[in-house]
Image: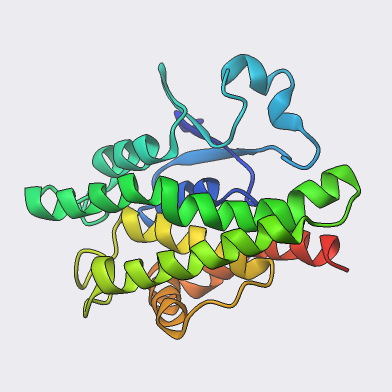
Amino acid sequence: MTASLTLHVDYVSQPSRSLVFLCRAIKAPHQEKQLSLVKGEHLNKPFADLNPFKKVPAVQDEDLLILESCSALRYIASKYDAAGTWYPADLKTRCKVDEYLDWQHLNTRAHGVGYYMNKVLLPMMKGSAPDMEVVEKHEKELGRVEELFASYFLGDKPFITGNTPTIADLQAATEFEQPQAAGYTLAKATKEYLERVREAVGAEMYDELHEAPKELAKKALQ
């Protein structure tokens, strides 16, 4: 029987990896349909008919279509995580998860993807050298983001909400791994945090999914 839950993803995409991490971690029955962002498959049929935003990931579950990754993380964790740990029902804990997911759009994500996009993807697609002025702007902002993440969101906790990782940590880890794959040097505290997330989800799966952005960056920066 084919699983009703379908993820349209490219492992180069941070939020795609977050969703795959979650589904595999909770053993949610699902299928993964992979697209290539570099080849522009997200811009053309049949995917463009499914997703008018022409971005990955996209999630289908029976007659439900979800085109925003944070909404998809919340939905999948709420429906398929029997243990209830990835998106906890406790109101205060859930609020802290949501707080990070709301904050990261213009911070971790904006500058992590900005660094990777301008150093790796755009030069590869255009056949040109990176605009290092733009790359350095994102690099500077990433330093600010790391400081805020460590001081406010983590503090003295191993994960964002305490001793147990949530979907907020999955999103944070994939976003921090992206610029690192392109040569950005993360702070010691961020590296230690990523290692905790890696151990929590399983080192083999973590390394497997993060190989895609690393390999693409290696190819682009040769």
Q: Position of residue 218 (x, y in %)?
A: 79, 67
Name the side, left or right, on which 137 lies relative to 20: right
Point out residue 169 in the picture as x, y percentages from the top left corner: 35, 61
Q: What is the residue that sits farthest to the right in this orientation?
A: 127
Residue at coordinates 67% horizontally, 64% vertically from top-left? 211
Q: In this view, does 22 lie to the left or right of 128?
A: left
185 or 173, nearer to the observer: 185
Q: Nearer the viewer, residue 52 or 32?
A: 52
Q: Is residue 180 visible?
A: yes
Question: Farthest residue in the front direction?
Answer: 133
Name the spot of residue 21 as percent of width and height, x first. Answer: 46, 55
Left-right relation of 18 to 112 = left
In the displayed structure, 130 sits above or below 153; it is above
Residue at point 68% right, 51% down? 117
User: Which image quadrant is residue 219 in?
Assistant: bottom right
Residue 95 in the image: above or below residue 7: below
